Amino acid sequence: MQLLRVGFWMLPLQRWLTLLGAASLLVGLVFHPPANAPGSTLPPTFLGVGLMVMVPLLAGGVFLRMLSTSRALLLRPHARGRLLAGAVGILLLASSVWIFAYWAAFQQVPAKFRPPLEEYSLMLAMTLSLGTLCAVALFIASRSPMWTLLIILIWQAPGLLLHALGVEDATRLLGGPVSLAMSLLVWLVFGIWYLRARRIHASAWGHRQDSTPAMATTSVSQPATREQAMSRWLLANQSAPQLGLYCLLAALFVLGFQWIFAREVEAQTLHAIMFGTLAIVAVLTGAVGRTMAARSRALWLPAGRTRLQLYGWIERQSLLVALAIGVAVGLAATLVWWLGAPHPAMPLGYLLPALLAPGLCSVWLGLMQQHRRSLLDVLAMIAIAAGIFYGVVRPLFAGSAAARWDVLGAQLVLAALLREMARLRWRSADWRRAQRV
């Protein structure tokens, strides 16, 4: 029960997502679809379950490492075994609820419209595969990004091998028994290491931050200015061009795998997958803005600025990072556009701003996390996700050539509203508490 609380109810954002997801799921289950509209409850049920399982399914590895490095928690009997069992249990629970929502959406329709049992098994295997990859990869990513890249390569090795050998129906094999076997093998190997490891270290970002002053005194000949020191602190000793380069390499790596495995599907589906992935990469600016907002408390007094002056300086730093990530996304999108055959029906002049608009909204959404989170943050996240779906993914999937300038305009209005909300929150921040910290 404690681990379920960590997975679904620990943070205020998780609580709002769980409540909104449960409400949407109940709406989809209570209002049954008519016989001539099979599966019409799929949008509310899938939205509800997606909101509920988003955090525990995608961030399970981060929570597992956080709990595994707590010395007080590890003093309990069989602490690691219970943590590992809890992580697997949360994954199984999230996958089961996802399949249940899909099953319940088709119970009030004729039998001929109901999906076969094989489709449920494929969905379960793919959901377990995604959850396993997120849990194990994020657990290791917090220590070594290189090992994360190696795990992704090993994870995709069966698919590459089946495609290289020309195995027929490789997609069904990858979505079913091969995927399930890989998930079981990964959990087995990871569980043996997890239980036998003498010590599980904390995240590597904190280790690098602790060693930054000693490294700076030995490697930097000239002392850093106040502005340089503040920038290094906000970006964990990184720079905007470095973050943009990392995003470009990661985007090209993921797009390459998508092209290898999905080149046999329709061109519209492949375009929707690839450009949707680039839009998600652009949203990483929100994570950077959230980190900068969290680290800003240590700069209240050393910065020598008022609240709004400090906010303006941090906002400029975050926009530089957004510009670097936007350039990376734009280069990757242009490369996909020119190398893809056939080209997407939507013009490139619309796709580029449509991919960058969610990242612009995410910048100020991340800066809003400095103080007093509320339901507005969750609604803003849902609006950003809806903008990606209705502005990029859905038109490309349908093969539409009409640019959705209305969706793009709504995203720009949302960005302006989030910026004003961020300024209001920073202006009303608790100055006395910041002084004590």
Image: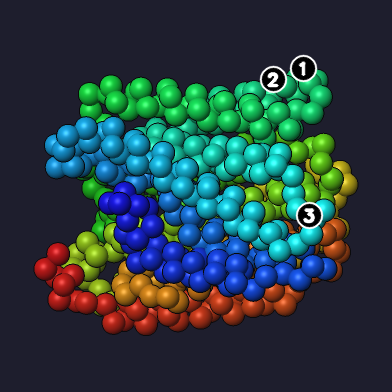
Identified by mark 1, the residue type is Leu
Colour approach in the figure: rainbow
| 163 left or right of 218 in image | right
Mark with earlier residue (2, 3): 3
Residue 349 in the image, given as x and y percentages of width and height: 77, 63
Q: Which residue is mark 1?
A: 165
Q: Quadrant of the C terminus?
A: bottom left
Q: Which residue is mark 2?
A: 161
Binning the other alpha carbons within 10 Å of mark 3 as few (below 14), some (14 to 19) or many (20 upward) gives few
| 227 left or right of 268 in image | left
**Residue under the point 64% across and 50% down:** 277
Residue 55 in the image, given as x and y percentages of width and height: 44, 54
Residue 274 in the image, given as x and y percentages of width and height: 70, 48
Mark with earlier residue (3, 1): 3
Binning the other alpha carbons within 10 Å of mark 1 as few (below 14), some (14 to 19) or many (20 upward) gives few
Evaluate if marks 2 and 1 touch, with contact meaning CB atoms under 8 Å apart.
Answer: yes
Whether residue 420 can be seen here? yes
Identified by mark 3, the residue type is Ala
**Residue under the point 23% across and 28% down:** 199
Q: Which residue is mark 3?
A: 111
